[in-house]
């Protein structure tokens, strides 16, 4: 799968629909609060793609500090 910052993150259609329903302010909080196991603390994510796992959105990307792979699970609202 090819991705570059110029083309932006890639989402499956259902993941894109889910992410679009998340308020912009919440999207920012989610992307700026991701655990990096390499850095050992919360970091910002450079978003690469989004996929669905069941009812949950999984955001995949890179740590803004070490460039290691990170992911963030976003559960649906109750």
Image (spheres, rainbow, N blue to C red):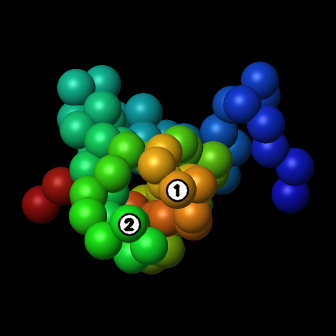
Q: Quadrant of residue 73?
A: bottom left
Q: Residue 37: x percent and y percent?
A: 39, 75
Q: Residue at x 52, y 56 (%)?
A: 66
The percent coordinates of residue 62 (x first, y second) are 56, 54
Task: Specify the farthest residue to the left.
Answer: 78
Which residue position holds label 2?
39
Q: Which residue occupies 48% across, 45% down?
A: 64
Q: Name above or below for residue 26 compared with residue 36.
A: above
Tell which circle, 2 or 1, labels the residue nearer the N-terminal end: 2
Query: Crowding near pointer 2: few (<14 within 10 Å), some, many (20+)?
Result: few
Residue in the foreground of this view, choosing between 58 and 28: 28
- Mark 1 lies on a secondary structure that is loop
Q: Secondary structure at mark 2?
A: loop
Q: Nearer the viewer, residue 68 or 72?
A: 68
Q: CA distance from mark 2 to mark 1?
A: 7 Å
To which residue does mark 1 refer? Answer: 66
Q: Can you name the residue that lies furthest to the right here?
A: 2
Q: Is residue 27 above or below residue 50?
A: above
Q: Position of residue 76 (x, y in %)?
A: 26, 59
Q: Is 54 placed above or below 66 here?
A: below
Q: Is residue 53 above or below residue 2?
A: below
Q: Is residue 61 visible?
A: no
Q: Is residue 44 left or right of residue 12?
A: left
Residue 51 shown left or right of residue 26 in the figure: right
Q: Is residue 29 visible?
A: yes
Q: Nearer the viewer, residue 16 or 69?
A: 69
Q: Specify the label residue 38 is tagged with.
A: none
Q: Is residue 3 left or right of residue 16?
A: right
Q: Are marks 2 and 1 in contact (CB under 8 Å)?
A: yes
- Counting from the top left corner in percent of width and height, residue 78 is at 12, 60
**Quarter of the rendering occupied by the N terminus:** bottom right
């Amino acid at each position: 799968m090819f991705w570059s910052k110029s083309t932006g993150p890639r989402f499956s259609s259902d993941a894109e629909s889910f992410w679009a329903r998340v308020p912009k302010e919440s999207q920012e909080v989610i992307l700026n609060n991701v655990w990096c196991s390499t850095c050992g603390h919360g970091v910002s994510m450079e978003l690469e793609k989004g996929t669905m796992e069941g009812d949950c959105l999984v955001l995949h990307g890179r740590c803004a500090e070490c460039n290691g792979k990170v992911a963030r699970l976003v559960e649906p609202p109750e």
